[in-house]
Amino acid sequence: DVVMTQSPLSLPVTLGQPASISCSSSQSLVHSTGNTYLIWFHQRPGQSPRRLIYKVSIRDSGVPDRFSGSGSGTDFTLKISRVEAEDVGVYYCMQDTYWPFTFGGGTKVEIK
Amino acid sequence: EVQLVESGGNLVQPGGSLRLSCAGSGFTFSSYWMSWVRQAPGKGLEWVANIKQDGSEEYYVGSVKGRFTISRDNGKNSLYLQMNSLRADDTAVYYCARDGVERPLGYWGQGTLVTVSS
């Protein structure tokens, strides 16, 4: 199975400042189609996860444009340009190139 | 509006069985892959299984293969997870999820809690 590794584990941020989360995979996530299938989720405390980004960099409908995804091959990044209070919670990456799909361990974002 | 409502979670003894259900509404159920994802208390997310629109393909995480079966009834807009030979490490909130316009897990239910304990 593909192992997904996120860093940091915890990320204290200041409101209005940028934040960045890294995600790496144990093998390339480039599919035989040529596409790369990497998803980012956000889970607020006590809530179900919400998908933010798929195929590395495509934002889901309704996701603020302060969220952006980038990367290729085995290394990926989620960036928040200016953190808002509603952005707290845990962020997960997940690869959907290979079965079984696998998640990273999560990065907890909190306000300083 | 897409809605997914899970049910069937309960306390069950090790070795026991349980069947989870997920009712979908607000969309054409038969048009989407569907998945189950679980989250143990205080832990991260684990993808469990998914099933193709017509039920012709199913995929599972290794730890549940041979014990869990995913199925669907498109006529009832429902997804199921039959869980047998349950173990303590199956204790988790189980979420039902639908593909987005593209790719998996675009919409999630609120989850149902399964506790495996004697």
Image: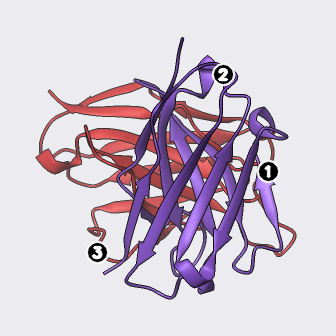
The chain coloured red is: A
Residue annotated with mark 2: B87
Which of the 4 quarters of the picture holds residue A11? top left
Q: Colour of chain B?
A: purple
Q: Residue at x 45, y 68 (%)?
A: B23
Mark 3 secondary-structure assignment: loop
Identity of the amino acid at label 2? Arg
Whether residue A19 sits left or right of residue B108 in the image: it is left
Residue annotated with mark 1: A28
Is A74 or B20 nearer to us in this picture? B20
Q: Which mark is residue A62?
A: 3
Is A8 or A49 nearer to us in this picture? A49
| Whether residue A98 can be seen here | no
Q: Residue at x 47, y 47 (%)?
A: B8
The verdict on a common chain for dots 2 and 1 is no
Whether residue A74 sits left or right of residue A58 in the image: it is right
Q: Residue at x 58, y 53 (%)?
A: B36
Q: Is residue A83 above or below residue B98?
A: above
Which mark's residue is nearer the viewer, 2 or 1? 2
Q: Quadrant of the C terminus of chain B?
A: top right
